[in-house]
Image: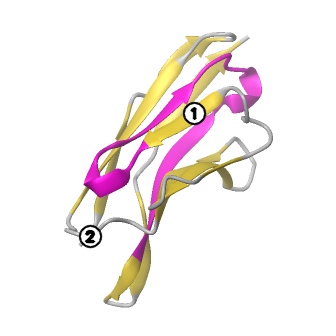
Amino acid sequence: QVHLVESGGGLVQAGGSLRLSCVATGTPFSFKTIGWYRQGPEKQRELVATIDVDGTTEYSPSVNGRFTISGGNRKSPVYLQMNDLKSEDTAVYYCNAKTWVVVDGRSEYWGQGTQVTVSS
């Protein structure tokens, strides 16, 4: 069973920075993709950034140039460096991983989330 544990959230002023970490356990295999989604107040969950097994990254246009995803290869932690934070970045941030192998009908996993609050 894959488990994803996030850390690094908190309260920060607009213009500040935070770094989120996600540690994955429970599988000896590399992930097809691993990354971050977020859900703001009264909003749907949305993609923030992902990195695939080849190191190819994808970013939401709203964070491109401000956020950087790294790690996630060979089961290392995946990080999300968030700079120049804005109030609209306030959300619960979830780590997400997609596996190559389907186990018990699952090939996608979520962490429990970490709160990021940006004060203006």
Counting residues from the start of the chain, the first of labels 2 and 1 encountered is 2
Q: Does residue 116 belong to the magenta stretch?
A: no
Whether 10 is drawn above or below 25: the answer is above
Q: Which mark is residue 47?
A: none
**Which residue lies under the disc numbered 2?**
29
Q: Which mark is residue 68?
A: 1
Residue 84 placement (x, y as % from top left): 68, 16
Specify the quadrant that holds the C terminus. Answer: top right
Whether 17 is drawn above or below 117: the answer is above
Q: Residue furthest front?
A: 54
Specify the amino acid type for callout 2.
Phe
- Range of the magenta residues? 71-99
Mark 1 Cα shell of 10 Å, populated few (<14), some (14-19), many (≥20): some
In this rendering, position of residue 13 left or right of residue 61: left
Q: Secondary structure at mark 2?
A: loop
Q: Nearer the viewer, residue 103 or 100?
A: 100
Residue 15 placement (x, y as % from top left): 68, 10
Residue 52 placement (x, y as % from top left): 50, 59
In this rendering, position of residue 29 left or right of residue 89: left
